[in-house]
Each structure stands twice: as structure tokens, then as C-alpha cells.
Amino acid sequence: MKKVAFICVHNSCRSQIAEALGKHLAADVFESYSAGTETKPQINQDAVRIMKELYGIDMEASQHSKLMADIPDPDLAISMGCNVMCPFIGRDFDDNWQLEDPTGKSDQEFKIVIKRIEEEILKLKDQLSD
């Protein structure tokens, strides 16, 4: 089974959402991991709250902020978006989802980003199922 890593600088919001949705929606097709080039002491609390509300997923129960060295070598590395700073992970990214960081923005902005991540996860699931 392929290992997919979702990467952003701090591994506290978008990449954590992608890991959670990957595990929730595509665990039968690929293993999901998230990591960053830096870590935060906790996952973004707005992301935690909204993911519980939308999917019943408690990201804090099973996830924490991790560095690339903390996860297995991925078969696919996906950048969440390099609009702030693109992390260097020692290899090229296989894809860049170009997602805006919703940190500090409204719940509606978070939900737009979460829905886009869900769509990308489902597309990736279809691609890897073939």
C-alpha cells in the first residue's frame, strides 16, 4: 500500500486535515501521514473543532505535529501550498494542492479549504485505485 505524506511548514492545520481525511476516506487505498519542516505545540484549534463538527474526527486523539524525520519515507509527497514558504523536504513534491492557509480566518474559510482537501483526497484515492 502506498504511503502518502501531506506536507506544510508547521504541520498544524492543512496537512493535519489532509492526514485525517486520508485516514477517514481512503485508508483502504493508501496510508496517510502529515509532517512539516517545523512543528507547533498543538494542532490548529479551529481545524480541530471544525473537523469534529463536520466529520466527527478528533484529530488531537490520534495526531500531533511531526517533522519529516518522524514519518516513514513516503511514496508520494504532496505540498499543501507554498503561498507562505515552500518547505524543503530533501526531494521534489509529487503535487502541490495550492491551498490557502485558513489560520486566523473565518469558519467559512476553513470549511472551503477542508472541502477542497476532501475533493483532492477523493481524486487521489481514485488515481491510486486504478
Image: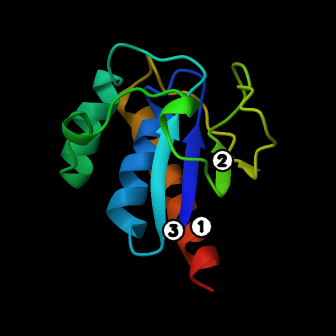
Q: Look at the numbered disc 2 and give the secondary structure of its residue.
A: strand
- As drawn, 115 above or below 112: below
- As drawn, 26 above or below 37: below
- Relative side of 40 to 54, left or right: right
The residue that mark 2 highlights is 78
- The first of marks 2 and 3 along the sequence is 2
Question: How many residues crowd around disc 3 within 10 Å: few (fewer than 14), some, or many (20 or more)?
Answer: some
Residue 19 on image: x %, y %: 43, 47
Quadrant of the frame with the C terminus: bottom right
Asked whether the beta carbons under mark 1 and mark 2 sit within 8 Å of each other, the answer is yes
Residue 3 on image: x %, y %: 55, 59
Q: Look at the numbered disc 1 and give the secondary structure of its residue.
A: helix
State the residue lying farthest toward the bottom. Answer: 130
Closer-to-camera residue (15/36): 36
Give the residue at x 28% y 23%: 45
Badge number at residue 124: 1
- Relative side of 119 to 17, left or right: right
Q: How is the image coloured?
A: rainbow
Give the residue at x 35% y 23%: 44
Give the residue at x 22% y 48%: 57
